[in-house]
Image (spheres, rainbow, N blue to C red):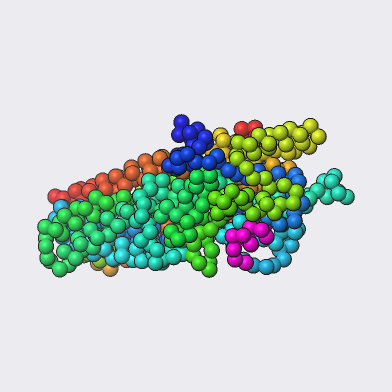
Amino acid sequence: MAAEARALDPAALAGHRDHPPRMGFFTDTSICIGCKACEVACKEWNAVPEDGLLLTGMSYDNTQGLGASTWRHVAFIEQPGADHDGLRWLMSSDVCKHCTEAACLDVCPTGALMRTEFGTVIVQDDVCNGCGYCVSACPFGVIDRRPSDGGAHKCTLCYDRLGAGLMPACAKACPTESIQFGPLDELRERAGQRVAELHDAGRSEARLYGEDPDDGVGGAGAFFLLLDQPEVYGLPPDPVVTTRELPRIWRHAGIAAASLALAAVAACVSGRR
Amino acid sequence: MKSRTGRRDGGKQMVPEAEFTSYYGRPVLKETVWEADIPSYLFLGGLAGASSALAAGAQLSGHPELARTAKVGAAGAISLSLAALVHDLGRPARFVNMLRVFKITSPMSVGTWLVSAYAPLAMGAAASTVGRKLPRAGLAASAGAAALGPAVAAYTSALLADTAVPAWHDARRELPYLFVGSAATAAGGLGLLAVRPEAAGPAVRLATLGAAAELSAEQLLDRRLGPEAEPYRTGRAGVLLRTGQLLAIAGTGAALLGRRSRAVSALAGATLLAGSAVTRFAVFEAGRASVRDPKYVVGPQRDRLDARGG
């Protein structure tokens, strides 16, 4: 199966030979303290422009969501719970998922979106013509077009830092190691142990999100440990890459085109005396 | 944040109230950055592609007046649609970057190559027939445009269906037929508008077939999706879709009944063109509505997970 092969090694399938191991993020939200150091470090390192300073009333969240100029976003959820005086406060740093089967990359008509040797997905800014197809294709609502330059932007997993043997800026800045960076295999193993630990401690609500290579995007390169359902954090509960349906979509479009040609012939021929 | 939402099934039976959760009611997906350019492009590309097919048929079956009109219409429509396509880019000067690669996984890439091949043929066919020059080259261009035209009209359905936008992706099975139907309606409408009724027989028949296909596809879509067709039924999209249906029915009726009157035929043609355009905007708006409200994204995915026991 192609899907299984892709789940194994997206970089090799993109044509990278002798490439480094697939790198990714494991964001353990159970130890996130909502400091937003990741948001700041990301903006600083990547020179991402300011995109609005306002108070939203959404707990401590004033960035609201990922976008063209917000590549790490910390979500804050206040729930009735037993943690602190009847309040449970969930915090989670969201980021591009660097999907194994990446819809943004599939639909990009210019080749601006590409798979790196680390198995991550980046936009080549000098190629992107701002068509916006990736924006509507992403099943996580991550990538967006920046009004000031008309191009699509998102997390690069600090491709420049990786090339120099450094870890991404957000992971480096995270004071609790809620954001962990490393080879995806190791991260998956570590995440499995962490969930087991939490379950043993009675926190049965702990779950992994995006780590399963058999999920709708072939597994995410950036996955999460969550303490509630994904949609509570603004994440889609069961995203599926749209291009899995594309062969059937093309087939129907082809039949429709042929039908139109036949209809035109029929409309002309039936009138002949 | 919990929200309660009653999911309706065509106003008849109520599906049990579904509860879904979202992050402060914010959309999960990003709203499309495409604006009115894109539904206009869908309409104009359909009009052009179906007109080229009609032009070839009309020429072969001895309807030269209709053939000429359809060729000129196709050339005009594809020129306007190219302008809309470039205008919609965030970086219009880089349109040419579309031609760096060919990707079957990107309907936009496939479509750009298709239109790049089709547009010069449609324009050549029109130029030859208007200028009465190079008849053999004109014939070849007409044949080429007629061969590619239906693909130009149909591929836009794949363009919308191959997204994460619930209303577009969920409609993937019906959308191609809806779009080529709408394209045929528009091409027939243009013929009726611009050609004497005595010479517009094929245009009437193509418009009738198109309207029938379009309306059937909409019915099938509504029935198959059930509660998930809500973005097509409600709000601005719902109003537009019903308006498009009324215009298609009225235009077809007037075209069939008013065959002897130049004025009635022309009005019927304009009505059909308007109907086709409104329908494209309806589909576009349904997609936008299905992204704006997170229930259309979260609801079906949550149901799917729960059904799997996840």
Q: Is residue B261 magenta?
A: no
In the shown orientation, is residue A102 left or right of residue B181? right
- Residue at (48%, 47%) from the top-left corner? A115
Looking at this view, is B68 or B217 the one in front?
B68
Residue B257 position, x and y percent, is: 29, 58
Residue extending farthest right: A85
Looking at this view, is A149 or B7 the one in front?
A149
A108 lies above or below A214: below
Residue A5 position, x and y percent, is: 48, 33
Looking at this view, is B244 or B22 the one in front?
B22
Secondary structure mainly formed by the magenta segment: helix
Q: Which residues are magenta?
A: A39-50
- Residue at (83%, 50%) from the top-left corner? A87
- Residue at (17%, 67%) from the top-left corner? B130
Does the rendering let one see residue A257?
yes
Residue A236 position, x and y percent, is: 61, 46
Looking at this view, is A167 or A253 the one in front?
A167
